[in-house]
Amino acid sequence: MASLKNINLQFRKCTYYGITGEVGSGKSGLLGAILGEIPYYSGVIAVGGSISYVEQEPIIFSMNVRDNILFGKAFDQKMYDYVLHASCLESDLEILDAGDQTMVGEKGITLSGGQKARLALARALYADADIYIFDDPISAVDAKVARQIN
């Protein structure tokens, strides 16, 4: 098993960063260590602020679309409309029988990989965090939608 060594990073506020590398090079592992989900053996990881994370394989909960996005936060129509637009979910909600009240996950309808990714992105954006970590969240969406999200 490969390990990352001698890494020294500092991220500044209000700046976008990208971590690139070959498949299996440790990008997701590094993100996991920053999130506190993967143990590290030396050094210090300090995070200043709240984090919102979108993983490669998004988790969709057995609840309706809106609750998957709000994830326990209070409903704010303006913010909700913004994240639906930013994550390109508006057209999906138009075709669902119950709109954002449609049940998804194990006890509801099955979403495509792209829909799951965009739903997880909407959840992350709605969290209104200080820090956003995206681990290749748009790999499952088609090229046209990916351009709109970017």
Image (cartoon, rainbow, N blue to C red):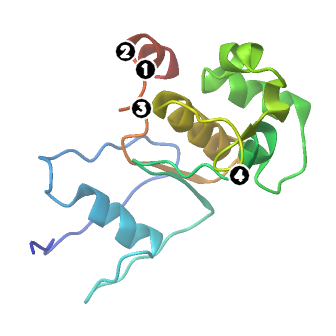
**Position in image of residue 103 (x %, y %):** 77, 40
Q: Amino acid at mark 2?
A: Ala
Front position in the image: 40 or 95 = 95
**Position in image of residue 99 (x %, y %):** 81, 24
Question: For the residue carrying disc 1, how many other residues have a C-alpha within 10 Å: few (<14), some (14-19), or many (20+)?
Answer: some
Check whether the beta carbons of the residues at disc 2 and disc 4 lie within 8 A of each other.
no
Upstream in sequence: badge 1 or badge 3: 3
Label tally: 4
Question: For the residue carrying disc 3, how many other residues have a C-alpha within 10 Å: few (<14), some (14-19), or many (20+)?
Answer: many
Upstream in sequence: badge 2 or badge 4: 4
Q: Nearer the viewer, mark 3 or mark 4?
A: 4
Residue under the image location 36 percent in, 61 percent down: 31
Check whether the beta carbons of the residues at disc 1 and disc 3 lie within 8 A of each other.
yes
Which dot marks residue 62? 4
- In the visual, does 130 lie left or right of 62? left
Upstream in sequence: badge 3 or badge 2: 3
Check whether the beta carbons of the residues at disc 3 and disc 4 lie within 8 A of each other.
no
- Under tag 3, what secondary structure? loop
Which dot marks residue 138? 3
Residue under the image location 24 percent in, 69 percent down: 8
Quadrant location, the N terminus: bottom left
- Cα distance between the residues tagged 1 and 2: 5 Å
- Cα distance between the residues tagged 2 and 4: 28 Å
Q: Nearer the viewer, mark 1 or mark 4?
A: 4
The residue wearing badge 2 is: 143
Q: Amino acid at mark 4?
A: Ser
- Under tag 2, what secondary structure? helix
- Cα distance between the residues tagged 3 and 4: 22 Å
**Position in image of residue 35 (x %, y %):** 46, 68
